[in-house]
């Protein structure tokens, strides 16, 4: 499905992108044979009004079945000059979305699947969560998988962590020069083990 844009008046009274999409993906329809089918959003998240993630359950005759993920790209601009403040593009996890910031609380609700693209997407989301759960301490030494070239011409692969409150500064182990890498916690890196020398006291 392509992008769908709308003015606020077409949002059915919903004040946010998340509220609109929760409603959009929760419905029940009567079938010709008297049965009913639909889907129900169990949990959702739309951080920064950029990407919407939802755990959505298939409903048959009021009974819950498979739970799969829906991912929507979101455009939210309350000041849009043409009045079309909200747009979205929806897809299922089986389509292999590139967006992989789905919260663990939503991933944990999904039922097992054998769909290759869905499995790959879930694995990429979990890998993202694991990377972001890593902790850095002041003085840690980290190593990137490949050397990185900076604007001053230096090419570096290892850095010493210097923490300044919530800020993380990377120091060149040789010169002490300061560097910054965008989205550091989303990137692959490893902590370089250091050998600590313990003092021995003799009585």
Image (cartoon, rainbow, N blue to C red):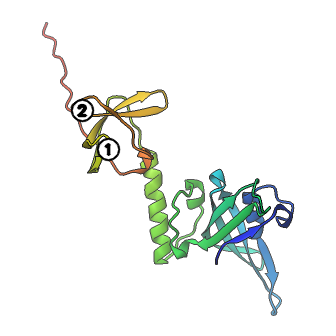
- Which-is-in-front pick, marks 1 and 2? 1
Residue 11, percent from left and from top: 82, 64
- Judge whether 16 appears above or below 173 on screen: below
Residue at image location 48% in from the left, 77% down from the top: 114
Say few, some or many: other residues with alpha carbon within 10 Å of mark 1 (under 14 / 14 to 19 / 20 or more): few
Circle 1 residue:
150
| Residue 54 visible to an observer of this rendering | no
Residue 35, percent from left and from top: 80, 86
Q: Which image quadrant is residue 51 in?
A: bottom right
Q: Quadrant of the C terminus?
A: top left
Q: How many marks?
A: 2
Observer-nearest of 178 and 20? 178
Residue at image location 27% in from the left, 34% down from the top: 172
- Judge whether 56 appears above or below 34 on screen: above
| Residue 75 visible to an observer of this rendering | yes
Circle 2 residue:
173
- First reached walking from the N terminus: tag 1 or tag 2: 1
Residue positioned most to the top: 203
Residue 17, percent from left and from top: 73, 59
Q: Relative to 164, is 140 on the left or the right? A: left
Q: Which image quadrant is residue 53 in?
A: bottom right
Q: CA distance from mark 1 to mark 2?
A: 15 Å
Residue at image location 21% in from the left, 27% down from the top: 196
Q: Relative to 28, is 122 on the left or the right? A: left
- Judge whether 20 appears above or below 116 on screen: above
Residue 88, percent from left and from top: 68, 67
Residue positioned most to the left: 202
């Amino acid at each position: 499905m392509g992008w769908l844009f709308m003015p606020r008046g077409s949002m059915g009274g919903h004040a946010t992108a998340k509220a609109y999409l929760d409603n959009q993906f929760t419905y029940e329809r009567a079938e010709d044979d008297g049965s009913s089918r639909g889907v129900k959003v169990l949990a959702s998240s739309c951080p920064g009004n950029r990407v919407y993630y939802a755990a959505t359950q298939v409903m048959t005759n009021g009974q819950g079945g498979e739970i799969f993920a829906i991912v929507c790209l979101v455009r939210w601009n309350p000041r849009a000059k043409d009045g079309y403040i909200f747009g979205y593009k929806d897809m299922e996890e089986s389509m292999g979305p590139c967006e992989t910031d789905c919260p663990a609380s939503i991933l944990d609700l999904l039922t097992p699947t054998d769909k290759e693209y869905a499995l790959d997407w879930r694995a990429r989301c979990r890998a993202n969560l694991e990377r972001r759960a890593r902790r850095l301490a002041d003085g840690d030494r980290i190593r990137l998988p490949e050397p990185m070239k900076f604007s001053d011409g230096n090419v570096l692969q290892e850095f010493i962590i210097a923490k300044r409150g919530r800020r993380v500064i990377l120091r060149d182990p040789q010169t002490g020069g300061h560097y910054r890498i965008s989205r550091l916690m989303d990137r692959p890196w490893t902590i370089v083990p250091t050998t600590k020398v313990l003092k021995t006291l003799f009585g």
